[in-house]
Amino acid sequence: MLSLKRLFGTNGIRGLVNKELTPQMAIKIGSAIGTFFQRGNLIVGYDARTSGPMFAKAVIAGLNASGCNVLFVGMSPTPALQFAVRNHKMNGAVIITASHNPPEYNGIKVIWKDGIELSREQEIEIEDTYFNEKIHHAEWCNLGTTRALHGVIDDYVEAIKKHVDVSEIAKKEYHVIIDPGNSVGSLAAPRLLRELGCKVTTINANIDGTFPGRSPEPRPENLKDLALTVKSVGADLAVAYDGDADRSIFVDENGRIHWGDKTFALVEKHFLKDNPDEKIVTPVSSSTLVKDIADRYGGEIVWTKVGSVTVSQTMKNLNAKLGGEENGGIFYGPHQSVRDGAMATALILNIMAETDEELSKLLGELPEYFIEKGKVECANDIKKKVLEKLTEQLSELNMNTIDGVKLWFEDKSAILIRPSGTEPIYRLYAEAKTQEKTIQLIEEYSSKLETIINSLKS
């Protein structure tokens, strides 16, 4: 969360409302952002959290004080706001959201003129302005203005529809269950799907910043009601979004919940059929399944550090058209190189319509991997030394060290061991062709980590 030396984490600024992140801080952060944009024109919007309007007003005050003009959207999905930046040729945006965090958190994302979150270098510039009192306050006669911007969701929905075969999807008359988790996913996705000719049933679609229906993190353990609903009403599929609707997790017609690797691999497969030799950008936390598909259909995998900003920035730098994460983030470059839950939903429906196949069959045709996760406690001050020793011990193995240590084995199993950026722990992600092998990998490498950690304590 927030510290004395850093504002930005792996995905914007986040903190507990009125404890780690206060309105007073938000005003100053807004002024630092405004100083960075040098009297630019910015969009501001927020997700469904109860503190969203409060922080939006504070950030806008800071932006106006530095001379920036604001187009205020109000409540909106993050990807709709990102699309609006490019659509209205703005200099950037500030989005008030804490994404999948619990309701007592909020945060601030800063977007560049291309709709993508700022690079780390740009974040450092804002941090330097904030901490070293370099904020520019405009003269009374040069303060920024604020006015409302309407039609953002209209434009966003129409833009998504341009990338799929609307008439083909409409012919199928799919019944789709949508679970936006009481947040902003309910503002765009149900409308989009109805305009694609789908019958839409919603659960947890009433906007409520306390998130009473489920956690804003769309994890399998939080989606049991959604899975039961699919089976009980005989729907063709279901989709759940996170708090700001940039990630999507899908449930097939049998009520089986699929983690993001599977649906991303399905999109990747059909993308590469039409676009061979393209680069596919994905973090090292993604399943080997993603590489299997790239190898089979002529794509090139580009591994990155974990984090959606890194995926977006890498896509931009390489002019890549597709990226994805294991947590349900799909980045479709022809639309925009950012995570977009509604765009991902339209792509999945398009594949189903083109192939005339049920989602369970399409996903069942992909290579199968079992996944297991683990964690080991590790003090923050020894994380770097632990990683050095672990890397040294495993140097003879097939390894990638772009973010922690990722190991691949000849039997197609793999494990990622990386220090958490927010907690005093190491996270482990194992996958294999059997559940037993994944458990074995977690136990084996947890033990190796514990041995190294204990040796550094003594």
Image (cartoon, rainbow, N blue to C red):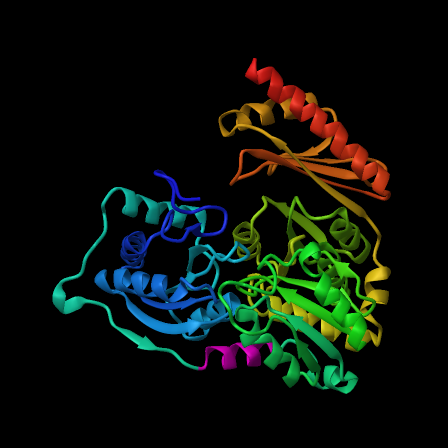
Location of residue 236 in the rendering, given as x and y in whole percent from the top left corner: 78, 75
* The image quarter in which residue 424 lies: top right
- What's the magenta bit mostly, secondary-structure-wise? helix
Which residue is at the front of the view, 121 or 13? 13
Location of residue 109 in the rendering, given as x and y in whole percent from the top left corner: 43, 57
State the residue lying farthest toward the left. Answer: 140
Which residue is at the front of the view, 64 or 52? 52
Q: Is residue 235 visible?
A: no
Q: Residue at x 77, y 86 (%)?
A: 171
Q: Residue at x 31, y 70 (%)?
A: 70
Which residue is at the front of the view, 46 or 418? 46
Q: Is residue 33 above or below residue 64?
A: above
Q: Which image quarter is the N terminus in?
A: top left
State the residue lying farthest toward the front. Answer: 212
* The image quarter in which residue 328 lies: bottom right
Location of residue 385 in the rendering, given as x and y in whole percent from the top left corner: 55, 23
Q: Residue at x 65, y 56 (%)?
A: 324
Question: Taking 207 as reference, is 45 left or right?
Answer: left
Give the residues drawn in magenta, as a range.
Answer: 151-161
Question: Taking 135 as reference, is 263 left or right?
Answer: right
Question: Taking 289 as reference, is 284 left or right?
Answer: left
Q: Residue at x 74, y 68 (%)?
A: 274
Q: Which image quarter is the C terminus in?
A: top right
Which residue is at the front of the view, 334 or 379? 379
Q: Is residue 152 visible?
A: yes
74 inside magenta stretch: no
Location of residue 18 in the rendering, given as x and y in whole percent from the top left corner: 36, 52
Question: Taking 253 as reference, is 111 left or right?
Answer: left
